[in-house]
Image (tube, grey):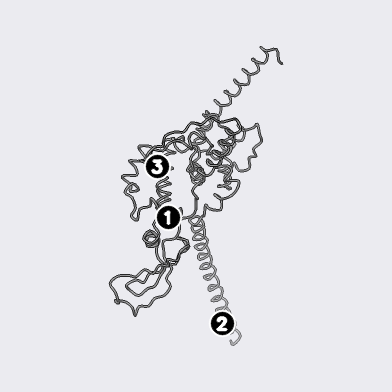
Amino acid sequence: MAVRKVLSQRDLINMFCRSCNMLFRVKCASEMKTVRSLANQTAAGERDPAPLFFNSNVQQLLKKLTRMDLRTIFRTKRYGAPLKAPEYKFMTTEELDAVMKGAEEKAEKKLQMPPVIKARSEEPEVLSSDYELQGHSEAKFIFTDITFGSSDRERIMVVRDTNGVLRKATREERYRMNETYFPQPGRSIRMPHMFEKEYLERLLDQRSYEFVLDRACLQFEPDDPMYQDVTATTYEAVDRAQHYSALRSTRHFGPFAFHLAWNRSIDSLLLDLIQTDRLDEAVALIQLYHIVNPEARSVSANFEPGLEHKFIQAYVESDSKKRNVLELALQANEELHKQRAETEAGILRAHGNT
């Protein structure tokens, strides 16, 4: 009887341990699944475009897509400033070449693209919680380092709230203090009404894309969420209306193309490049898409000079959202190139060349 009793207790202990282990595994598996899900969501939400945007290959592709048209770059912008009378000079060929070289260098500076970076966090860091100071004042105190030469982005600013909490300044507080002590020319301490939804839509309907983007660069920092909302809204309006010439040869076309690649919406721009027979830029756009989206199905396609149609066709078949339209445009472009080749061959035969 004693032996049976011991065995029964062991059986009960083993059964209890097995059930506990099973519950533990189920709970751990559930928790690990939740952790992985949150990690994936965090990774997707915290994807930083800056490393890709500042990549040297990406910068070269964006410059190629922008195009350097000196007439567009140096055209007169009627933003309310008085116009200057043109100057006419007689030059030798050497002097003209030197002037043109200087103009190209100035154009490079004018085409310097606004950076595309991640929006900064809105939650300020708490430094200390001194609740014994609660009720000491009805207004909060902002302490600002006004040392000459300090960067506006790195300048120390802390805030003592009415509840006694000492924290770093928020984005809005930092902006207002910088504008109070170190105002930037042309920047308003209050957000201009033009960036409000009603007025912004009206400006975009008037095709004032470059004006909106120039003003946003002046008013906001690149990591300001408001700046990113305004620029994204403008880019989407340009792409929706297919008014690509409005931003071509400006400093905003590179970030615009990067925005399209980042959001997997390059098809309309690609169609425009194919229809205007800019196959080299179409290839550059797809290469940009592959760098920004390495998981794309057509990323394994290799480009070889002279085989632009084949490279574009690989993207159209695998990743395009407007496959039918792009295939028709690509076929029409191929026919155009065949007709050109036949015409050139006919001219050579007419001149006695084989």
Residue that carries the numbered disc 2 in the rendered image? 9
**Mark 3 residue type:** Phe
Contact check, label 3 and label 1, Cβ < 8 Å: no
| Residue 218 drawn at (x, y percent) | 41, 50
Among numbered discs 3 and 1, the one appearing first in the sequence: 3
| Residue 303 drawn at (x, y percent) | 64, 38
User: Outermost residue, right direction?
Assistant: 354
Residue that carries the numbered disc 1 in the rendered image? 224
Q: Secondary structure at mark 1?
A: loop
Q: Residue at x 50, y 66 (%)?
A: 31
Q: Nearer the viewer, residue 150 or 119?
A: 150
Q: Secondary structure at mark 2?
A: helix
| Residue 248 drawn at (x, y percent) | 48, 37
Q: Nearer the viewer, residue 99 or 289?
A: 99
Q: Residue at x 53, y 42 (%)?
A: 106
Contact check, label 1 and label 2, Cβ < 8 Å: no
- Alpha carbons under labels 2 and 3: distance apart: 83 Å
- The quarter of the picture where the C terminus appears is top right
Q: Secondary structure at mark 3?
A: helix
Looking at the image, how many numbered discs can be counted on the residues? 3
Judge depth for marks 2 and 3 and give the one in front: 3
Residue that carries the numbered disc 3 in the rendered image? 211
| Residue 23 drawn at (x, y percent) | 52, 70
Decide if residue 169 is on the left or right side of residue 110: left
- Alpha carbons under labels 1 and 2: distance apart: 67 Å
Judge depth for marks 1 and 2 and give the one in front: 1
Judge depth for marks 3 and 1 and give the one in front: 3
**Mark 1 residue type:** Asp
- Alpha carbons under labels 3 and 1: distance apart: 19 Å
Q: What number is the disc on residue 51?
A: none
- Mark 2 is surrounded, within 10 Å at the Cα level, by few (under 14), some (14 to 19) or many (20 or more) other residues, namely few
Q: Is residue 313 visible?
A: no
